[in-house]
Image (cartoon, helix red, strand yellow):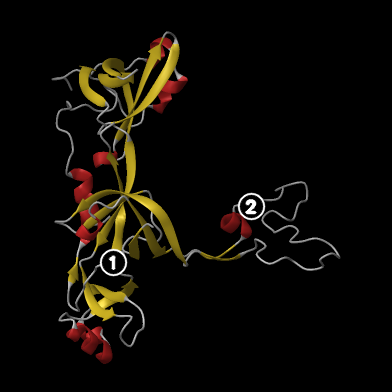
Amino acid sequence: MNGMIGRKLGMTRLFDEDGRHVPVTVIEAGPCVVTQVKTAGGADKYDAVQLGFGPLKPKNAPRPQKGHFEKAGTGPLRIVGEFTLDEGDAYVRGDRVDVSLFTGVARVDVTGVTRGFGFQGRIKRWNQGRGPASHGSKNVRMSGSTGMHTKPGRSLKNTSMAGQLGNKQETKKNLSVVRVDQERNLLLVKGSVPGSKNGIVYIRVSR
Amino acid sequence: MSNIVDTIRTEKLRTDLPVFSIGDTIRCRMNITEGGKTRIQNYEGVVIARQGSANEASITVRKISNGVAVERVLPIESPNLAGIELVRRGRIRRSKLYYLRELTGKKARIREKQFGRK
């Protein structure tokens, strides 16, 4: 399988054997439960496994979902996600997947939903400069020109303007795996990952 | 911060360093790698600040080297810091001694801590 679901716990730092400082993000990776297996020969027409992660109180789970999770022999789970299979993988519904999946893996991609900043101006959102503050200036934080004149007579698409910043799915690729802690189900990767603390992240082995 | 991250931050803290505080003069034994060889270099100065906690803690050590003021920020959990010797304890009244940067000569001295006195 190419990945699993986890929860970002926070950041700290470690030192490597040369004494260099390594910033790391601590991710609680799994344990996940295989809640469904999709096969190319079956109704789904493609190979994948669905993983569930994070307990959910039974009273908060919709009834159809309860039945779905019962088939996997587990209580209701908060998050499900689909992952592709590697050659020769044979997973059965109800299997548990833990962080040992990443033993020997050098690099991973981490997907998460970035922290939301709401509607922000172009200075914060696009790192643009500001106008002069004094001498009668009135465009301190205003956007300047957004395009040309008669030709093309419109603003081009993707012009950087004010708008929603963050709260958007993002993937950070090729993060080095620093440590795999099987006892505590922890995965330590170098650098930051998208999302807030306790945010759900999808960890996949880098191609 | 979650408890698990706190555990990771505190689980391998070193215990070989003496107790020292801000205002003390310390001798830091630094591992210096030059041309594939590692040797120890001493760096002696006054601790003027301490930042962070657990494995993220670092100290700022200030010295006057040949008339030039030098400040180094040393992560105390770094393996490159081979050890610390306490040279002199200082009597100070604040936790960040940034005011020393403005002072020179006799004014930049720190009184030694006298024990057993009020």
* Circle 2 or circle 1, nearest the eye: 1
Q: What secondary structure is marked by label 2?
A: loop
Q: Which mark is residue A128?
A: 2
In this rendering, would B63 be left or right of A158? left
Q: Amino acid at mark 2?
A: Gln
The N terminus of chain A - image quarter: bottom left
Q: Which residue is mark 1?
A: A87
Residue A189 sits above or below residue B86 on the image: below
Q: Position of residue A119 (x, y in %)?
A: 56, 67
Of all chains, the one bearing label 2 is: A
Of all chains, the one bearing label 1 is: A
Q: Do marks 2 and 1 share a chain?
A: yes
In this rendering, would B1 be left or right of A131? left
Query: Which of the 4 image quarters holds residue B116?
Result: top left
Q: Position of residue B32 (x, y in %)?
A: 31, 20
In this rendering, would B113 be left or right of A191? left
Measured in 3D between alpha carbons, the distance from the residue under mark 2 to the one under mark 1, in whole angstroms, is: 47 Å
Taking the spot 44% from the left edge, 22% from the top edge, the residue there is B101
Question: In this orientation, which residue lies closer to the viewer: A42 or A132?
Answer: A42
Q: Residue furthest right?
A: A150
Q: Residue furthest bottom?
A: A63
Q: How many marks?
A: 2
> Mark 2: few, some, or many residues within 10 Å (few <14, many ≥20)?
some
| Badge 2 or badge 1: first in the primary sequence | 1
> Can the viewer see residue A115?
no
> Can the viewer see residue A32?
yes
Taking the spot 32% from the left edge, 48% from the top edge, the residue there is A24
Q: Amino acid at mark 1?
A: Glu
Residue B80 sits above or below residue A158 on the image: above
